[in-house]
């Protein structure tokens, strides 16, 4: 075992404590008391005083076992402490993390490895992941993102964006970064990753950023990815960004950021195929989930869509943004998104489309079924004039195609406006379908519940009565808006029960 190699480097007393505490029992040992007792005994017997008087055990070893669900289990395990990591909230652990990952990468073709992060506060800068690897956080482990700018190397802008989003040049690499990987898992029993974003938000507002802010987790050009059962707080910017990847599962995350913090999107699948985002609870300052695929001419030429995306059992609070946004960067196309069991509370809009002239690309075959919404500005919001261009070189003839947008089984209350649907002149957004929608307007609702331009579609059983561009087909068509019954490849990705034992401090 990896651990055993590294334990040689531990102080002799640690090894001693370990051998005294039967390694196969689950117990916490007060080694200090034990050392004292033995010291006394040794004094009486009169041998070995010199060795043992220096002995001191401040902490006892713990042998514990951990069970978790993952796309694959690992044959090897090590703790960040084996690589010199210190969880005191003050020691910078960037090198320990990077050395641990680099060391464990040797097991990629030998059953893979997991890196365990024990309880504690682990201050760290950015580090990179490897293939056939699991990063596992103990429930009381907190990864604290370093606030020293030197902990954040600068990398190139994404090819499908051409520019950083906060500043034209490069971008600070994400806290946890991986590229060109296969089979990578970041999980834990709800352990925490704290981006300590306040400083970044302040720099952003003061327009002092030289490069684009880092994300908490970014996985690029990878397949078979799992990010699950973690709490992510105060990200400098987006939280979870899988990009140019396939077979991605994002499950069981609690994502928290002040609702006024800038661009703290929850989960942003970007040019990804086969993604499953489920059982997440998100409170944030921007869209809870933002589906993307590149920006204007850069996204068009990169040409990598997001497709076959499942979003289910999402709970979202985001007073100034959407529960789910499609765009605004959608120039590589977005197709076949299936959203189900969406709850939003005090959120600006439900499933929103954001696009603009110059984006090109498409948003089509979107299926939304089952939304429960409380206190919303708009239930439906589609925007064709979002603007926000990468630069001035976008093609004014690159018009997005927005087609086949299906919404059904929606209940909403305390709503200011039912729908605001704005297509592009000469580029109407078509095939909009809404059925079985009941919206209770707020006491202070807008005078007209709907506003529609440049859109075409049909409705059935929608209250209040929709705009004339979406004619009513009658109550017998309540189930008319499509929701696919076939299942996607990513739904067949099974999670196994993995377990490992860790002997740690
Ligand atoms: C997340 O945790 C829950 C229990 O809290 C467990 O049922 C589920 O399997 C876990 N999922 C993953 C992917 O770790
Ligand atoms: C992490 O990956 C990025 C992008 O490939 C690279 O620029 C950086 O040097 C890597 N960091 C380390 C410590 O290897
Ligand atoms: C990662 O994969 C992309 C896409 O396949 C490729 O263009 C790039 O060269 C790869 N990078 C590395 C470091 O292998
Ligand atoms: C995870 O931790 C967060 C923050 O403490 C908490 O709100 C959430 O309920 C926890 N989730 C689970 C599944 O225990
Ligand atoms: C209704 O929404 C308004 C904001 O538009 C909010 O102030 C009020 O508390 C909400 N009422 C309820 C009952 O949720
Ligand atoms: C209408 O939507 C509600 C949930 O909002 C659902 O329970 C009901 O089955 C739907 N009716 C039809 C005919 O699909």
Image (spheres, helix red, strand yellow):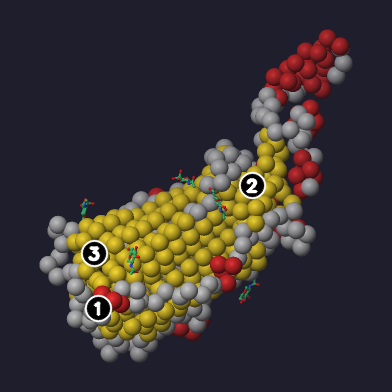
Q: Name the residue under label 2.
A: 67
Lower sequence index among marks 3 and 1: 3
Viewer-closest of 313 and 40: 313
- Establish if 28 lies above or below 482: above
- Residue at the spot 28% in from the left edge and 68% down from the top edge: 437
Res 237 → quadrant: bottom left
Secondary structure under the numbered disc 2 in the rendered image? strand
Q: Mark 3 points at which residue?
A: 439
Q: Looking at the picture, how far across and down is residue 316, in whole percent?
A: 37, 57
Asked whether, in this view, residue 409 is left or right of residue 6, the answer is left
Local packing at callout 2 (Cα closer than 10 Å; few below 14, some 14-19, many 20+) is few
Viewer-closest of 83 and 324: 324
- Residue at the spot 25% in from the left edge and 84% down from the top edge: 454
Distance from mark 3 CB to nearest ligand 6 atom below 8 Å: no
- Establish if 136 lies above or below 370: above
Q: Looking at the picture, how far across and down is residue 189, in whole percent?
A: 56, 46
Report the Cα–Cα distance between label 2 and label 1. Answer: 52 Å
Q: How many marks?
A: 3
Residue most extreme to the front: 476
Q: Mark 1 points at which residue?
A: 474
């Amino acid at each position: 075992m990896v651990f055993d190699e590294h334990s040689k480097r531990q102080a002799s007393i640690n090894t001693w404590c370990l051998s005294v505490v039967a390694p196969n029992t689950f117990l916490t040992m007060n080694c200090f008391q034990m050392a004292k007792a033995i010291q006394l005994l040794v004094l009486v017997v009169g041998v070995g005083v010199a060795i043992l008087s220096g002995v001191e055990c401040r902490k006892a070893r713990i042998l514990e076992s951990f069970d978790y669900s993952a796309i694959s289990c690992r044959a090897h395990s090590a703790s960040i402490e084996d690589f010199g990591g210190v969880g005191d909230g003050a020691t910078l652990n960037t090198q320990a993390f990077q050395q641990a990952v680099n060391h464990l990468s040797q097991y990629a073709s030998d059953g893979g490895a997991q890196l365990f992060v024990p309880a504690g506060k682990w201050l760290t800068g950015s580090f990179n992941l490897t293939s056939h690897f699991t990063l596992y956080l103990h429930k009381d482990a907190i990864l604290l993102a370093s606030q020293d700018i030197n902990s954040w190397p600068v990398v190139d802008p994404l090819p499908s964006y051409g520019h950083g989003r906060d500043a034209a040049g490069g971008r600070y690499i994400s806290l946890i970064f991986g590229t060109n990987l296969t089979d990578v898992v970041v999980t834990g029993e709800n352990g925490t990753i704290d981006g300590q974003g306040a400083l970044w938000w302040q720099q952003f507002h003061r327009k002092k950023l030289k490069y684009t802010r880092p994300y908490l987790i970014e996985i690029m050009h990878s397949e078979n990815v799992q990010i699950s059962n973690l709490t992510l707080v105060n990200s400098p910017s987006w939280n979870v960004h899988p990009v140019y990847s396939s077979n991605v599962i994002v499950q069981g995350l609690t994502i928290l950021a002040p609702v006024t913090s800038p661009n703290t999107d929850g989960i942003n699948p970007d040019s990804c195929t086969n993604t499953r985002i489920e059982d997440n609870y998100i409170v944030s300052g921007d869209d809870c989930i933002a589906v993307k695929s590149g920006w204007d001419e850069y996204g068009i030429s990169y040409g990598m869509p997001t497709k076959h995306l499942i979003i289910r059992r999402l709970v979202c609070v985001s007073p100034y943004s959407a529960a789910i946004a499609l765009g605004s960067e959608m120039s590589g196309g977005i197709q076949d998104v299936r959203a189900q069991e969406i709850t939003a509370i005090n959120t600006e809009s439900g499933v929103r489309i954001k696009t603009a002239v110059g984006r090109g690309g498409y948003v089509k075959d979107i299926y939304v079924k089952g939304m429960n919404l409380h206190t919303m500005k708009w239930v439906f919001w589609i925007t064709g004039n979002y603007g926000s261009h990468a630069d001035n070189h976008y093609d004014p003839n690159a018009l997005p195609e927005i087609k086949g947008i299906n919404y059904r089984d929606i209940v909403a209350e305390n709503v200011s406006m039912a729908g605001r649907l704005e297509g592009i002149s000469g580029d109407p957004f078509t095939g909009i379908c809404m059925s079985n929608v009941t919206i209770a307007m707020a006491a202070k609702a807008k005078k007209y519940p709907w506003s529609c331009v440049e859109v075409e579609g049909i409705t059935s059983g929608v209250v209040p009565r929709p705009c004339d561009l979406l004619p009513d087909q009658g109550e017998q068509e309540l189930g008319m808006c499509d929701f696919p019954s076939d299942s996607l490849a990513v739904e067949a990705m099974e999670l196994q029960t993995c377990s490992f034992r860790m002997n740690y401090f």
